[in-house]
Amino acid sequence: MLMKKRRIVQYLSLLLLHSSWGPELKWLCNPVLSCHSCVLSWFACPIGVFVHFSGYHIFPLLPVGMVLLAGVFIGRLLCGWVCPFGLLQDLLHKIPSVKISLPHWTIYTKYALLFLVVILTPYLWGESTLYSFCRLCPAGTLQASIPAMIASGFSTFPTATIVRWGVLLAILALAVVSLRSFCKVLCPLGAILAPLNYLSFWAIKAPPETCLECKTCDAACSMDIQPSVRISRKIPANRDPECIVCHECQTACIHGSKPGAKKPHE
């Protein structure tokens, strides 16, 4: 039931975040990857705002505060429950195909992208530089670039657009074979929120009684973080920077709440 609720919340978030009939609240950053250039978007994308402010050499005090406040309260729960691009990845991974796990070291790529293409390149060459994250953002391509091209009747097809669409197709293809691969490796917003999992007030409850260490929760984890390691130590599973607080591990646990249960080797 919890997973059904999560899927319902994801669909509702997709509709509500992109339901504007004209009014906008673009002064407010919604801490998920959702392009504010979309004509139906209500809120600003924090990554787009950071790129914009970095280009003008201004510290984005209010947007940073909004993102950090959300992270302190709920960590990366918005990634698992609200982000429209996260929902798309979840659905694409259901397509039958060979499934792979990415090397663990790739998770650090998103931190490099945050520094290089969200902060540094706009700071050096201005917000309009072709080397900022916004120019290749898959969410922006889906929500703004493609609709704009359709509206123009494909009258122009510049090289930058071809590159942008190519990046989108590659990311979508990777999502089919590797669950939440963009969240793990490429999302700069995830890089901002990730360390806040250690501080967030939100906690995934460990089994109240005996953990059997059956590792069923590890198999259910979409981010490959082995929640059983923390659960066995009575530490909330989301005290890991890569956790998107989807609660799949909690739902998958079928033994932990049984009083007096024995571990498999006992």
Image (tube, rainbow, N blue to C red):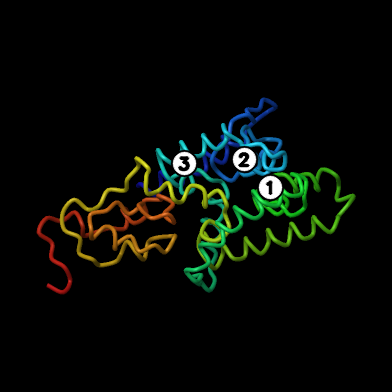
Q: Quadrant of residue 258?
A: bottom left
The number of callouts visible is 3
Circle 1 residue = 140
User: For numbered disc 3, what is the local secondary structure?
Assistant: helix
Query: Tag 2: residue type?
Result: Cys
User: For numbered disc 1, what is the local secondary structure?
Assistant: helix
Circle 2 residue = 45
Residue toward you, 109 or 156: 109
Disc 3 versus disc 1: distance between alpha carbons? 22 Å
- Against 104, residue 198 (above or below) is above
- Against 230, residue 119 (above or below) is above
Marks 1/2 in contact by CB < 8 Å: the verdict is yes
Query: Taking 219 as reference, is 101 left or right?
Result: right
Query: Tag 1: residue type?
Result: Gly
Q: Residue at x 55, y 48 (%)?
A: 189
Disc 3 versus disc 2: distance between alpha carbons? 19 Å
Query: Tag 3: residue type?
Result: Val
